Image (cartoon, rainbow, N blue to C red):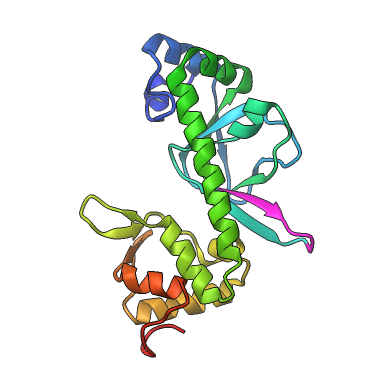
Amino acid sequence: MAVSTLILKNFSLLQPLPDKTLEQLGRQSKLIEVPRRKLVMEKNQIAHSLGLLIDGRLQGIDMTLDGREAGLYFIEPNDFFGELTVIDQQPATEFVIALTTSRFLMIPSTTIRQLIEKSPQIATIINQRLAQRLRESMQQRTLLTMPSPVQRVCAQLLQMTIKAPSGQQIVNYAPTHQEIAIMINTTRETVTRVFQKLQKKGIILRNGNSLEIKDINHLTDLAQGEPKNDNKPE
């Protein structure tokens, strides 16, 4: 069954395309739904399709030498994944797993490469995403060198913080403590303890699926290893 053009138009990557092209793309696309913890993209395998996440959440991960998961990045709705292996036709360098029940589209890599050749706008969006992913990877490596778990938790929250139209600093669809733990190479229990301290001191506030950053300056100080006083998390 063809994927509706209304679904395709939700993706910023595809919005530059005319309706006729979207209709053709819809006939080539495949809609997939997977349960939590399902492997979506396998490391060392060539991805034959570009994935576009409709809803849910995915995570790029790798495995450490001792067999532990190491989180690399999150994939949120309207984002895409597998672009590197689609472009260079080389094996994927990481796994992608579903953190929640998720739905996504798979568009054949040959089709995506044709779109890149024909549409400078599509090429620009993908290049910008590749550059962003590289910057995120460099930031994550820097974060992992921080000596204190408190610093790493706070730095990870800062990386995920956005400014809402209301002016609030928030983390949309905040990851679970376990998901953060594998991003910063610590335990879930450690992340939970840090969150409890941050919430107790009013630095962060849980609001449904999101986090409100109530004191961005203090969170920044903690990420830099500079607690202001003894009343805040150490």
Q: Residue furthest left?
A: 166
Q: Residue at x 71, y 41 (%)?
A: 42
User: Does residue 209 sit above or below 55 in this rendering?
Assistant: below
Q: Is residue 6 left or right of residue 67?
A: left
Residue drawn at x 53%, y 73% as measured from the top left: 191
The percent coordinates of residue 36 (x first, y second) are 58, 50
Highlighted range, magenta: 59-66
The residue depicted at 70 percent of the width and 26 percent of the height is 89
For residue 169, above or below residue 189? above
Q: Quadrant of residue 210?
A: bottom left
- Is 6 situated left or right of 84 in this image? left
Examine the rendered structure and indicate whether residue 132 appears above or below residue 61: above
Q: Check if residue 48 falls in the magenta segment.
A: no
Magenta span contains residue 65: yes
Expressed as whole percent of the image width and height from the top left, the position of residue 37 reads: 62, 51
Residue at the image point whose x is 27% and y is 52% from the top:
164
- The residue closer to the viewer here, 220 or 207, is 220
